[in-house]
Amino acid sequence: MGEQAPAASRKIAQKRTKATKKASVPESRLALVRRARRINRELGEVYPYAHPELDFRNPFELLVATVLSAQTTDLRVNQTTPALFAQYPAPEDMAAAVPEELEQIIRPTGFFRAKARSLIGLSTALRDRFDGEVPGRLEDLVTLPGVGRKTANVVLGNAFGVPGITVDTHFGRLVRRWKWTEEEDPEKVEAVVADLFPKSEWTMLSHRVIFHGRRICHARKPACGACPIAPLCPAYGEGETDPEKAKKLLKYEMGGYPGQRLAPPPDFPGRPAAPLGTGDADATEEAV
C-alpha cells in the first residue's frame, strides 16, 4: 500500500501537468462541453446509486422535506420528518396545524418559525388551489409559499420524473471549481449548466454533483488526493493531495460513516443514519 499511494499520486500529477499545459490555451466551447460530460460520466461510475438524500414517500413529503432542508442538513431533516408526517400526513392536516405545535416539531431544523409559516402557507395553497395535490409544473410550484426554483426542481425531478437542475451550495461550488461557469446567481448557474447537457441528464447530474460535493469535494478542504476526477479538475490542489491524508477527509459511505437517510434506497452501499434521539444520532451527525 505504501508504494501504491505515491504511484497513484504521481500518475495524477502527470495528468495534471498535461492538463495545466492545455489550460494555458483558452478552452473552447466544444472542449468545455466534452470535459463537462466526461466528468458527469465518471461521476456516474463512482456514484451509480446517487439519489435524493431526503426521506420521502410521496410528492407532498418531498416538498415539505425540501423546504425544511434550507440552512440545515438533509440528515437533520430526515431525523425530524417521521414525527412531522405522523402528525400531519396530508396538506389538509398541515394547513390546519396550530403554529406553535408545528414549530415545536420542526425546531431541530432551525429557522422553525419561518419554516412553519411556509409549511402552513403551502399546505393551505395546495388544499385551496390544487385540490390537496402537489402540482407537477414548475410555474405552479413556485407560486407556493417558501418554494423557489431549487425546491421546485427537486420535486419535479424526483417525484414527477420531470428533468431539472438543482443548484444548491454544493452544486454551485463544484461547477465553479470545474470552470463550467463563473456565475454566482443560482438561476444563471442553472441556465448555463443546462446548456451543457441534454435535458435527460439534468436530474441525475444534480445528484452526482451534490454527492461529490458532500463526500469528496468539500468547501473548506477538498480531498483532492482521493478524487476520481482529479485529472479533469482545474482546481486540483486546492485541497489535500496526499492520497492517504485525503482518504481521512472522505465522508458518509466513502469514509465508512452512515449516510443522511434513515431509509436509503436498497442499492445504497452505506449504512442508514440514526433516528433523532437515539444513542447513535450524535455519532451520525459528526460524519456530516
Image: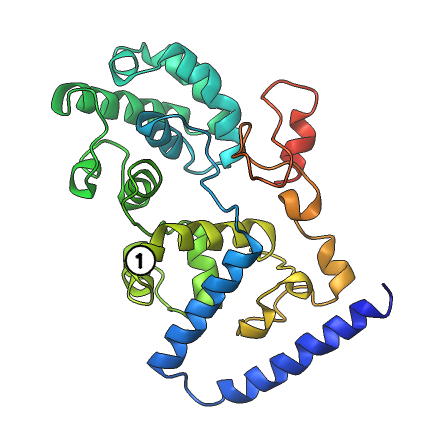
- Left or right: 60 with respect to 39? left
- Left or right: 284 with respect to 6? left
Q: Is residue 198 above or below residue 115?
A: below
SS at mark 1?
Answer: helix
- Of 67 and 2, the residue lying toward us: 2
Q: Quadrant of the C terminus?
A: top right
Q: Based on the displayed image, in which of its 4 quarters is residue 1 positioned?
A: bottom right
Image position, residue 154 (x, y; %): 34, 42
Packing grade of label 1 (10 A; few <14, some 14-19, many >=20) is many
Q: Amino acid at mark 1?
A: Glu
Image position, residue 152 (x, y; %): 28, 41
Q: Based on the displayed image, in which of its 4 quarters is residue 5 positioned?
A: bottom right
Who's the residue at 57% across and 67% down the image? 229
Q: Is residue 173 above or below residue 256?
A: below
Image position, residue 19 (x, y; %): 56, 82
What residue is pinned by disc 1? 190
